[in-house]
Image (cartoon, helix red, strand yellow):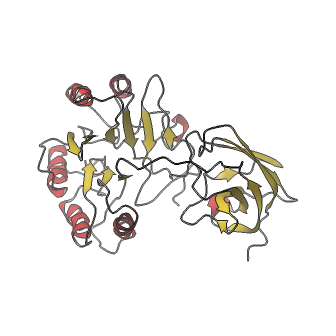
Amino acid sequence: MNNNIPSPMRAEYLRHSDKPGYAQGVLTIYAGEDLPCEYRAFWGNANGKLESYTALAPIICTGEVTEFELAPYTLIPRGADRLLVFGATQRGKELSDCYAEVMLPQGASDYDLGKPLYEMQVQSDIHLSQNPEHSHNLHFAAVLEDIKKTSPNTLGLFINGDITNHGYVTEYDAFMEIIDSTPSAPPVYFAMGNHDLSTYDDLPCDVATANFLKGTRNTWSDKAYFDLWIGGVHFIFLASERARQRAWLSPQQLAWLDAKLAENRNTHRAKYVFLHQGMVDTVAGCLAYQKWHDVEQTAELTEVLGKYPEAVLFSGHSHWKLESPHTMKPRDEKLPTIFNTSAGGYTWDDTSMTT
């Protein structure tokens, strides 16, 4: 029992979108006699929390009245007809026994997106260890099993950098052993991160790149940046060309990216671009105050990407949790849509604490 955690008195939800399924709006939470550290809101129905869904982004209690904005393009899960708001301890480790319930507008979750064209999964910052019992290794094994159950027909799992901790051959061997020992594992594709490029070790850059290509069984490129067409979908993998925390992209790589985005272009079909490090003020972990934006040629990359609004860029590196605000940056006049890919090994948030 957690009766010592204050629960909210009531909650209100003002939905701003008139599109069925879109959750954008403001959740207003009214505190009871005592204030909790945080709140956690869950999608629910008459049976309680909706199965298989975690809480929305952490909601810091700001006083007697707390307002929380649901991000644009957030979808209301099918089957949800209400929000359940709990009081919570710091980082949501424990929840209050009681909660405030607010009903969604009638028909808010009645929508049909149609049949997906394809499915894919993206993750980054696995940080595999040579020790097969390390928690990071166990996390990745669990990911493969989860994808087998939830997305058996996936195009693949795309690892957006920091596969290893040091770029060692033995770490890649341990990684591939997990894949090889998982029956019916999904196809896995890799972009190179700063740890794979041995930023924190003495491994020469060319050796680390060779280890990456060989260790990930990449037989289609002699460079760390390359592209693949999979099931008629274009995937483009960028990579830093210097061993440092910040991504350094040569003029040759940027020109290559421009050409690849123009290749067989269909403005109504997405092309997916992977770069381990993120650009400043785009997605969670890369906001200026968070200090995990690490692309040296941000202006040049922005100029190229801005020409292709149908592109979708994935960035990792920061480890910011997926439920953080700004996990997705909708496309605008300067940049296409960008997603934070969070981390498989361990995650961070605005408290700058490992969680």
Regarding residue 123, the answer to whether it shows in the image is no
Spot occupied by residue 101 in the image (x, y as percentages of width and height): 76, 59
Give the quadrant of the N terminus. Answer: bottom right
* 113 left or right, relative to 40: left
* 250 left or right, relative to 345: left
* 187 left or right, relative to 280: left
Q: Residue at x 26, y 51 (%)?
A: 190
Q: Quadrant of residue 223?
A: top left
Give above or below for 233 relative to 155.
above
Nearer to me, 303 or 202: 303
Q: Residue at x 37, y 63 (%)?
A: 147
Give above or below for 69 relative to 280.
below
Spot occupied by residue 237 in the image (x, y as percentages of width and height): 26, 41
Nearer to me, 112 or 184: 112
Regarding residue 192, the answer to whether it shows in the image is yes
Give above or below for 133 relative to 80.
below
Spot occupied by residue 39 in the image (x, y as percentages of width and height): 70, 56
Spot occupied by residue 165 in the image (x, y as percentages of width and height): 31, 57
Residue found at the far right of this picture: 33
Q: Quadrant of residue 25?
A: top right
Q: How many marks?
A: 0
Nearer to me, 275 or 310: 310
Q: Residue at x 11, y 50 (%)?
A: 219
